[in-house]
Image (cartoon, rainbow, N blue to C red):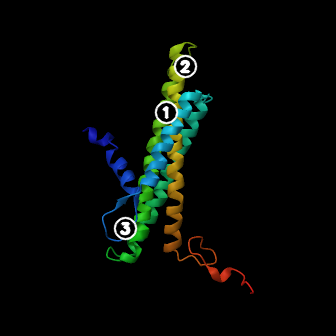
């Protein structure tokens, strides 16, 4: 019954997506990407905890996290449509376009996980707004914890967006056969002026 509220499959898909591309071999973890996300979020949390940064009005943060969550869900719907088109265009045994499908699948997991983190950040903001504003030790600790958790969540979401954008661009370029003169992935030496010796 509680499985409806479980995000464990989403967390697992997100974590599995942080692997190195492998040609039929078992996937290898991408420790650089995992480290940048996890260690960076930890450092952001410590920075927020130590500085006790003023996060501004809770209402503005709630609105920002709500917009972010809505935007991420809109991106998910577009990715789902794109993935459906890939399934229609290419057979399951067409290994030539498996990479593009995998890129979209990985991006979906990251986008949905980012939406969950954004909701969590909204929840942290709501809890922080409900806490009484006190100048004593409790107020200082609560402010530090809220700032640290918010910084960590925002860092992780931004990191996921940064990871996802190049993957989506690579899938788009490959599937749509973007011309070499406009393709940022393929290095086209023909466009460079010739050097005279």
Q: CA distance from mark 1 to mark 2?
A: 14 Å
The residue that mark 1 highlights is 149
Q: Which mark is residue 140?
A: 2
* Whether residue 126 is situated above or below residue 10 in the rendered picture: above
Q: Give whichever of discs 1 and 3 has the lower sequence position.
A: 3
The residue that mark 3 highlights is 22
- Relative image position of residue 126 (x, y in whole percent): 50, 28
Q: Which residue is drawn at the image coordinates 27% and 42% (left, top)?
A: 3
- Relative image position of residue 121 (x, y in whole percent): 49, 36
- Secondary structure of residue under mark 3: loop
Q: Residues within 10 Å of mark 1 (few under 14, many from 20)?
A: many
Q: CA distance from mark 2 to mark 3?
A: 48 Å
Q: CA distance from mark 1 to mark 3?
A: 35 Å
Q: Are marks 1 and 2 in contact (CB under 8 Å)?
A: no
Q: Which residue is drawn at the image coordinates 46% and 56% (left, top)?
A: 77
* Whether residue 7 is situated above or below residue 167 in the rendered picture: above
Of residues 149 and 107, which is closer to you in this image?
A: 149
- Relative image position of residue 191 (x, y in whole percent): 67, 80
Q: Give whichever of discs 2 and 3 has the lower sequence position.
A: 3
Q: Are marks 1 and 3 in contact (CB under 8 Å)?
A: no
**Relative side of 22 to 127, left or right:** left
């Amino acid at each position: 019954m509680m499985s409806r509220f479980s995000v464990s499959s989403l967390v697992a898909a997100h974590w599995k997506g942080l692997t190195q591309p492998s040609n039929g071999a078992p996937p290898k973890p991408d420790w650089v990407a995992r480290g940048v996300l996890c260690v960076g979020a930890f450092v952001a949390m410590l920075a927020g905890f130590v500085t006790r940064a003023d996060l501004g009005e809770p209402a503005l943060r709630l609105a920002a996290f709500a917009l972010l969550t809505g935007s991420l869900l809109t991106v998910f719907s577009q990715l789902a449509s794109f993935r459906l088109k890939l399934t229609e265009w290419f057979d399951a045994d067409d290994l030539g376009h498996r990479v593009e499908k995998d890129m979209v699948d990985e991006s979906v997991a990251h986008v949905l996980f980012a939406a969950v983190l954004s909701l969590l950040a909204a929840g942290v903001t709501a809890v922080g707004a409900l806490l009484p504003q006190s100048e004593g030790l409790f107020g200082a600790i609560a402010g530090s914890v809220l700032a640290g958790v918010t910084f960590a969540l925002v860092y992780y979401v931004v990191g996921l967006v940064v990871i996802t954008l190049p993957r989506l661009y690579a899938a788009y370029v490959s599937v749509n056969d973007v011309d070499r003169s406009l393709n940022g992935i393929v290095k086209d030496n023909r466009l460079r002026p010739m050097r005279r010796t």
